[in-house]
Amino acid sequence: MKRVLSLIVNPAHGHASDALRAAMERVGTLLAKEGHTPDWKTLSTGEAVETIFETSEENLDHVRAHLPPLLHDLPVDRALLPPDQRRKALFLADMDSTMIMIECIDELADYAGVKDQVAKVTEAAMRGELDFAASLRARVALLSGLNADVLEACYTERVRITPGAETLVKTMTAHGTHTVLVSGGFTFFTGRVAARLGFDEHIANRLDIRDGRLTGEVLPPISDANTKLATLEDRRSKMQLTKHQTLAVGDGANDVPMIHAAGLGIAFRAKEKAVQAADVALSHTDLGAVLFLQGYSRPEFAA
């Protein structure tokens, strides 16, 4: 069998290229013990490289087991993936703490003066310690009476796009990928973020607003982990795709079913449950790394 081994660093970090070179040397030594001399292909100078090698199941298990301790002290993200159907035709992404750098419900709670209380529940829910739907309703209830104008203020003042997110979506769109932003957050934000980044669709929860104020309720149905999984399966079926042609990225426990069901499931700066479910965990790089994992080189990235 063949496998692609990818090494990626974040150029924004000091000495990133040095870390990449060190990782290449260590991996080269590891593969040499398995009878392989890596032929590194540069996807972006000083940022991303990959090598394709032939291996057995036994040797692959050995390489997979030795990579984490081998690179643990370097700010390098790694992946060991099949070389076929690398460029995906369907892409699903979580929004909060994935495509954007905040949890919108926590920031709304800040305007209501209950951020600490809400943020603790959000953190526990994202770790998978609480029922998502029940915890969402409980948090939204604390926003009851909040002026709806705060939604726009929150978007303008607090929402920050994750580095690499726009490039990721626009590059995949340019290559014919169908993109869906699917969130346990709120449509007020997903609609704006989807339009800004270029997603084809967005799915999220709807806040109940009456007389210009939040009622503290979420309109059914709840968008949760099951929604994300169902969306992936539905779009895959309608597009007549195989599992291997799909990609999902997220950070929380409610992303686990979607990540697990995708041909390439990626945990981005994620909670442990998402990391365990994913094919690849990105901890150091920005979202542009998702393109490198599909074999895109930097010159192919959308401007």
Image (spheres, grey):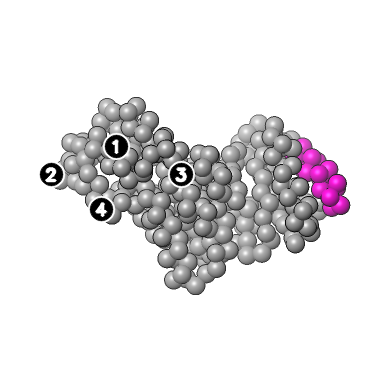
x, y (%) of residue 190?
Answer: 36, 50
Whether 258 is among the magenta residues is: no
Disc 4 marks which amino acid? Pro
Q: Are marks 4 and 1 in contact (CB under 8 Å)?
A: no
Q: Nearer the viewer, mark 1 or mark 2?
A: 1
Could you tell which of marks 4 and 2 lies nearer the N-terminus? Answer: 2
Q: What stretch of residues is rendered in magenta?
A: 22-37
Q: Secondary structure at mark 3?
A: helix
Residue farthest toward the left in the current orientation of the protein: 211
Q: Secondary structure at mark 4?
A: loop
Could you tell which of marks 4 and 3 lies nearer the N-terminus? Answer: 4
Could you tell which of marks 3 and 1 lies nearer the N-terminus? Answer: 1
Disc 2 marks which amino acid? Asp
Disc 1 marks which amino acid? Arg
- In the foreground, 111 or 298: 111
Q: Are marks 2 and 3 in contact (CB under 8 Å)?
A: no
Residue 299 relative to residue 57: left or right? left
Circle on res. 253:
3
Q: Mark 4 — residue?
A: 220
Residue 56 relative to residue 6: left or right? right
Circle on res. 211:
2
Q: Mark 1 — residue?
A: 139
Q: Nearer the viewer, mark 2 or mark 3?
A: 3
Residue in view at x 47 percent, y 54 percent: 258
Residue in view at x 75 percent, y 62 percent: 1
Q: Secondary structure at mark 2?
A: loop
Cα distance in 3D space between marks 4 and 3: 21 Å
Q: Residue 28, located in which quarter of the rendered image?
A: top right
- In the foreground, 162 or 62: 62
Q: Could you tell me how many numbered marks the image carries?
A: 4
- In the foreground, 108 or 121: 121
Cα distance in 3D space between marks 3 and 1: 17 Å
